[in-house]
Image (cartoon, grey):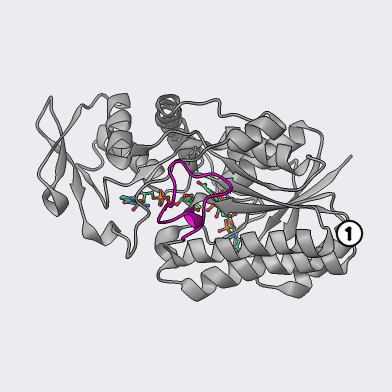
């Protein structure tokens, strides 16, 4: 039986990856940080909280990381733990580097010092492309990050390549474009939109506020994407791969799709901060713009070409944006019931 350490086990991808690895008969050691309980609501929701071996783990603490890796000698190390919210990285640039870049470096250095054959996976991101130089973006597209988060992830990306080239370690980077699911954190725009429409449908709120409606993202389904992570680490040759859908859409379009799922028909009027989204059936305003959600520098468009991973590992996306929105909206109701009936963290 192979053993995998997964950092970020309490996050969206950690939960789905753990579920996928367990189904492949891999022993999963879930690295969580103090303050989080040993099991997160996501693991509980998926029904796998009892199947994961918890490991207290802080990405800013070298001695703890080194000891864990030396003692456990994992076959795989999936580094998904991060300060992952772009907006917050502008307010916490140093902490973001500490965890996202130096955290990855601590893991790499620990594997090297412990002289292990551990296969390392780094959660790289389309945010590294930032102000994009080509459309679509692929593994050869030059990087131009636009946030402290993007800068930290790019540094970790290069560290992973550097350990591969310098020490022959099996280090791979998955350059993942935005991927969403019912388990997505509340602060990310897709989940925020779905949750707010649900709250409007329950008469708990009248409207909600967003920032830039024109940004375009390549959105896929997280459950499809963790399969790509597992495929990458099982390739003979470590390498870097884009995982994406090769389709891009605006935040505005995502709102329209989610609104439909709850029985609203969104139309738009006004411009900039004056713009509103209203239900054309009732004329009620459901969406307003608030500049507090704008970012100091924006990534305007992301769209990824996944040809390389399709060719090398046979991975391709299975879920359309329309199906993804539909499943996020229907699951939102179930999630609400889950939170109402479970004491979870
Ligand atoms: P997420 O839901 O925000 O989860 C982040 C995880 O990192 C949480 O488990 C969090 O633990 C953990 N973490 C944060 N700081 C830590 C620290 N100092 N030490 C140890 N663990 C720490 O993120 P996600 O969407 O699953 O994304 C997984 C990874 O992929 C992240 O590295 C993200 O940057 C990257 N990525 C995500 C996307 C996407 O669209 N989702 C795209 C590209 C790359 P707590 O629960 O204790 O906070
Ligand atoms: O959902 P977001 O916060 O995701 P973002 O910034 O693209 O980052 C996510 O994807 C990255 C991959 O490219 C990951 F690496 C990263 O960890 C994270 O998972 O914002 C998406 C877009 C942005 O352009 C933002 O300006 O939506 C725009 N937006 C408009 N109104 C908003 C809002 N974003 C948020 N979070 N909240 C709003 O109210």
> Going 44% across and 59% down the picture, which residue do you hit?
86
Name the residue that disc number 1 marks.
116
Q: Which residues make up the magenta segment?
A: 127-144
| Near-viewer residue (163 or 266) | 163
| Near-viewer residue (293 or 36) | 293
Q: Position of residue 65 (x, y in %)?
A: 76, 67
Q: Is residue 8 magenta?
A: no
> Going 81% across and 39% down the picture, which residue do you hit?
26
Quarter containing the N terminus: top right
Quadrant in the picture for residue 234: top right
201 left or right of 237? Answer: left
| Near-viewer residue (182 or 66) | 66
Q: Position of residue 41 (x, y in %)?
A: 57, 45
> Going 38% across and 54% down the picture, which residue do you hit?
299
Q: Position of residue 291 (x, y in %)?
A: 22, 59
Q: Position of residue 80 (x, y in %)?
A: 63, 53
| Residue 141 seen from this side | yes
Where on the image, by quarter, is ligand 1? bottom right
Label 1 Cα crowd, 10 Å radius (few <14 / some 14-19 / many 20+): some
Q: Give the overall secondary structure of the magenta segment.
A: loop
């Amino acid at each position: 039986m192979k053993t995998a350490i997964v950092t970020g086990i309490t996050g969206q991808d950690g939960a789905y990856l753990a579920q996928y690895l367990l189904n492949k008969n891999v022993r999963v050691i879930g690295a969580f940080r103090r303050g989080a309980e040993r099991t997160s609501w996501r693991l509980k929701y998926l029904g796998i909280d009892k199947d994961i071996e918890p490991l207290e783990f802080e990405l800013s603490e070298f001695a703890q990381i080194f000891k864990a890796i030396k003692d456990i000698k994992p076959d795989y190390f999936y580094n998904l733990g991060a300060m992952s919210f772009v907006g917050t990285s502008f307010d916490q640039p140093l902490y973001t580097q500490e965890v996202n870049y130096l955290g990855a470096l601590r893991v790499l250095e620990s594997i090297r010092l412990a002289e292990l054959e551990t296969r390392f996976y780094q959660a790289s991101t389309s945010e590294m492309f930032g102000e994009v130089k080509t459309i679509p973006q692929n593994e050869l597209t030059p990087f131009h990050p636009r946030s402290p988060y993007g800068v930290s992830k790019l540094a970790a990306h290069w560290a992973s390549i550097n350990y591969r080239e310098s020490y022959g370690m099996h280090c791979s980077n998955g350059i993942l474009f935005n991927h969403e699911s019912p388990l997505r954190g509340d602060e990310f725009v897709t989940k925020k939109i779905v949750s707010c429409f649900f709250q409007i449908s329950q008469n708990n709120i009248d409207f909600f506020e967003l920032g830039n409606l024109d940004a375009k993202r390549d959105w896929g389904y997280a459950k499809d994407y963790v399969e790509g992570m597992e495929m990458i680490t099982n390739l003979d040759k470590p390498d870097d791969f884009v995982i994406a859908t090769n389709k891009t859409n605006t935040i505005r379009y995502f709102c329209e799709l989610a609104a439909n799922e709850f029985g609203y028909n969104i139309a738009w009027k006004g411009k900039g901060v004056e713009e509103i989204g209203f239900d054309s059936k009732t004329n009620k305003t459901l969406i307003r713009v608030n500049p507090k959600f704008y970012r100091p520098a924006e990534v305007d468009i992301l769209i990824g070409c996944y040809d390389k991973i399709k060719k090398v590992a046979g991975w391709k996306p299975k879920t359309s944006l329309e199906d993804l929105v539909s499943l996020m909206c229907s699951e939102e109701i179930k999630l609400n019931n889950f939170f109402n009936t479970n004491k979870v963290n």
